[in-house]
Image (cartoon, rainbow, N blue to C red):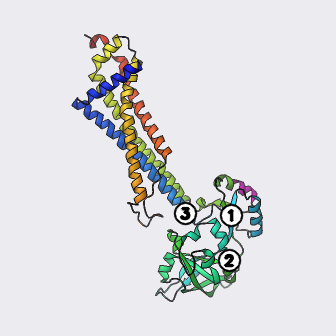
């Protein structure tokens, strides 16, 4: 029976190519399913790539876990001992301090000083917890934090360097406050100079235009401040969200992920991905519905053949299987063609960076993530939608009246 059904399905499709109306409908079904599948796969890959690239860009300047305290200073010895006890999950940690300041340069005509965030770090620790060292684009020695920050030098963002018209070995004037007189409401600013030892570029405007990196020793010379933050880099394979939940019960400090610093961006990316996937899934559903029209047309053209098969003892279920086979013979090649086209387009976009993005985004070119599992799931989903649509059209088979058709 299976061989007979396969033979009939092949013959019906072959005959359809010689009939103008059916031939056009087969082509419409094929290309609509192929285009919908390809669009769904390509858009999903772009959204995944955009989300991953944005996350990676934001994560590079932060560690996996951030530990802060606004009530009592963080004890670096306590953090070091805790990291040593949990060395299987914690790969490295670093301590940092931050303060606000104003900066000016004699190389620019700016009348107002530039507000900046000064971050004091331990160069060796920071290199193990974040990717800041890899973002140094120029230095007075080697492109390492250790050499760029030696002799009380500083590292600034490339946008800040452009605003102040400075480069390596130029001197900046720093204005900062250590005391605030509440009675007189006066803010006393202290002044210090610093030489630029390196310039970094993160690709994020708020960091490149308003951050200065200095060593902890230099920070202690300028500011009277305790340790406000610690950063933890996790070992490979450790789930950050689960481990953060554990740390919140083990540490007397506030513990959060780097994603908590950008809730709006993370939520927007997630919502955009789901919205685009839902919309294109509906388009794929509409495209798969074209198979219903083809099934109705085939039933109308082959009513006499179907009546003869039924009179010879063929079951309605076997006829349903016949038309489902026809639908599969169209939808499976169409789906594979759409997925192959999407992969080829995605491969070109990924390897040749053809589409540039405006500066408002954190990345310069359109990213794409070509995951085989993603293509497999989309292909299976579209094929199932098409087969289900064909089953809806086959409910009319049981209403065929043999006496009228064979008369």
Mark 2 and mark 1 in contact? Answer it, CB < 8 Å. no
Q: Quadrant of the N terminus?
A: top left
Q: Which mark is residue 58?
A: 3
Mark 1 or mark 3: which is in front?
1
Q: Nearer the viewer, residue 307 or 346?
A: 346
Q: Residues within 10 Å of mark 1 (few under 14, many from 20)?
A: many
Q: Which mark is residue 92?
A: 1
Question: Does the image show residue 392?
Answer: no
Q: Secondary structure at mark 3?
A: helix
Report the magenta residues as a range: 244-251
Q: Quadrant of residue 323?
A: top left
Q: CA distance from mark 2 to mark 1?
A: 18 Å
Which residue is labeled 2 in the image?
Answer: 216
Q: Nearer the viewer, residue 107 or 93?
A: 93
| Magenta region, main secondary structure | helix
Q: Is residue 290 left or right of residue 50?
A: left
Q: Earlier in the sequence, mark 1 or mark 3?
A: 3
Q: Earlier in the sequence, mark 2 or mark 1?
A: 1
């Amino acid at each position: 029976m299976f061989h007979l059904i396969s033979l009939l399905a092949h013959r019906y499709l072959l005959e359809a190519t010689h009939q103008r109306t059916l031939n056009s409908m087969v082509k419409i079904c094929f290309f609509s399913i192929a285009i919908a599948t390809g669009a769904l796969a390509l858009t999903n890959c772009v959204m995944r790539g955009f989300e991953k690239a944005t996350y990676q860009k934001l994560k590079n300047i932060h560690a996996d876990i951030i530990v802060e305290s606004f009530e009592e200073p963080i004890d670096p010895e306590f953090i070091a001992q805790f990291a040593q006890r949990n060395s299987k999950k914690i790969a490295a940690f670093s301590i940092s301090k931050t303060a606000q300041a104003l900066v000016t340069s004699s190389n620019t005509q700016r009348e107002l000083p530039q507000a900046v965030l000064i971050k004091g770090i331990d160069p060796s620790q920071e290199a193990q917890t974040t990717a800041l060292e890899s973002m140094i684009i120029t230095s007075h020695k080697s492109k390492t934090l250790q050499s760029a920050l030696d002799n009380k030098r500083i590292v600034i963002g490339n946008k800040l360097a452009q605003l102040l018209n400075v480069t390596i070995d130029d001197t900046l004037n720093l204005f900062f406050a250590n005391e605030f007189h509440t009675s007189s409401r006066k803010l006393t600013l202290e002044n210090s100079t610093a030489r630029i030892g390196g310039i970094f570029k993160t690709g994020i405007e708020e960091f490149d235009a308003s951050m200065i990196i200095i060593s902890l020793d230099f920070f202690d010379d300028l500011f009277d401040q305790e340790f406000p933050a610690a950063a933890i880099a996790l070992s490979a394979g450790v789930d950050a969200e689960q481990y953060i939940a554990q740390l919140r019960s083990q540490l007397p400090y506030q513990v959060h992920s780097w994603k908590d610093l950008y809730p709006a961006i993370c939520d927007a990316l997630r919502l955009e991905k789901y919205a685009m996937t839902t919309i294109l899934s509906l388009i794929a559903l509409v495209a798969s519905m074209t198979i219903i029209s083809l099934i109705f047309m085939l039933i109308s053209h082959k009513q006499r053949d179907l009546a003869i098969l039924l009179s010879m003892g063929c079951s309605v279920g076997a006829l349903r299987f016949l038309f489902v086979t026809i639908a599969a013979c169209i939808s499976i090649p169409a789906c594979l063609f759409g997925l192959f086209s999407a992969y080829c387009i995605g491969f070109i976009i990924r390897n040749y960076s053809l589409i540039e993005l405006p500066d408002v985004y954190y990345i310069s070119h359109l990213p794409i993530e070509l995951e085989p599992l993603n293509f497999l799931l989309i292909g299976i989903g579209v094929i199932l939608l098409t087969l289900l649509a064909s089953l809806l059209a086959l409910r009319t088979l049981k209403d065929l009246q043999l006496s009228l058709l064979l008369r």
